[in-house]
Amino acid sequence: MSDDSSNRPDIQLEDHGSKGRYVFRSAAGDEAEMTFTKVGERQVIIDHTEVPDAFRGQGVGLRLVTRAVEDARAAGKTIIPLCPFAASQFRRHPEWADVLKR
């Protein structure tokens, strides 16, 4: 497992080979996550985003997707946002078009 917090120190990356997740944890132990699956060397599918009520209205879900976008851009990868939340964020952020798999 990799724990890379270089881009957004509040978001942890857990990479388990073909699958992984981005995680935000509070001091109280609450956890928000966005899971992904790798497709080959150049694509990532965002499968699911889950943000507990403790984080509602704080932009945690957006921060998770933003971290994935930043990481994909840095690695030259594209993202397929199958998760409805991630897909809605891509519609709201046209500046992410460079990493969106068409």
Image: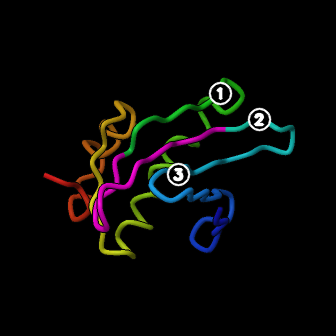
Q: Residues within 10 Å of mark 1 (few under 14, many from 20)?
A: few
User: Which residue in the protein does label 1 denote?
Assistant: 52
Label located before the other in sequence (3 or 1)? 3
Which dot, 3 or 1, sits closer to the camera?
3
Give how far across and how far down residue 88 sits, in percent: 31, 36
- What is the quadrant of residue 6 in the picture? bottom right
Q: In this orientation, which residue lies closer to the viewer: 16 or 63?
A: 16
- Which one is in front, 42 or 85? 42
Q: Which mark is residue 20?
A: 3
Residue, far top:
53
Q: CA distance from mark 3 to mark 1?
A: 19 Å
Visual colour scheme: rainbow
**Residue 81 appears left or right of 61:** left
Residue at x-position 56% and y-position 56%: 16
Q: Residue drawn 45% across and 35% down?
A: 48
Q: Nearer the viewer, residue 18 or 10?
A: 18
> Which quadrant: the N terminus?
bottom right
Q: Are the residues at dot 2 and dot 1 in contact (C-beta closer than 8 Å)?
A: yes
Residue 39 lies in the magenta-colored region: yes
Camera-side residue: 45 or 99? 45
Judged left or right of residue 48, residue 15 is right
SS at circle 1: loop
The amino acid on which the numbered mark 3 sits, given as a three-letter code, is Gly
Name the chief secondary structure element in magenta. Answer: strand
Residue at point 64% right, 66% down? 2
**Residue flagged by tag 2: what amino acid is it?**
Asp
- Residue 30's place in the image compared with 96, above or below, is above
Instruction: From this view, report whether residue 19 is shown above or below residue 83.
Output: below
Q: To which residue does mark 2 refer?
A: 30
Is residue 68 shown above or below 75? above
Q: Are marks 3 and 1 in contact (CB under 8 Å)?
A: no
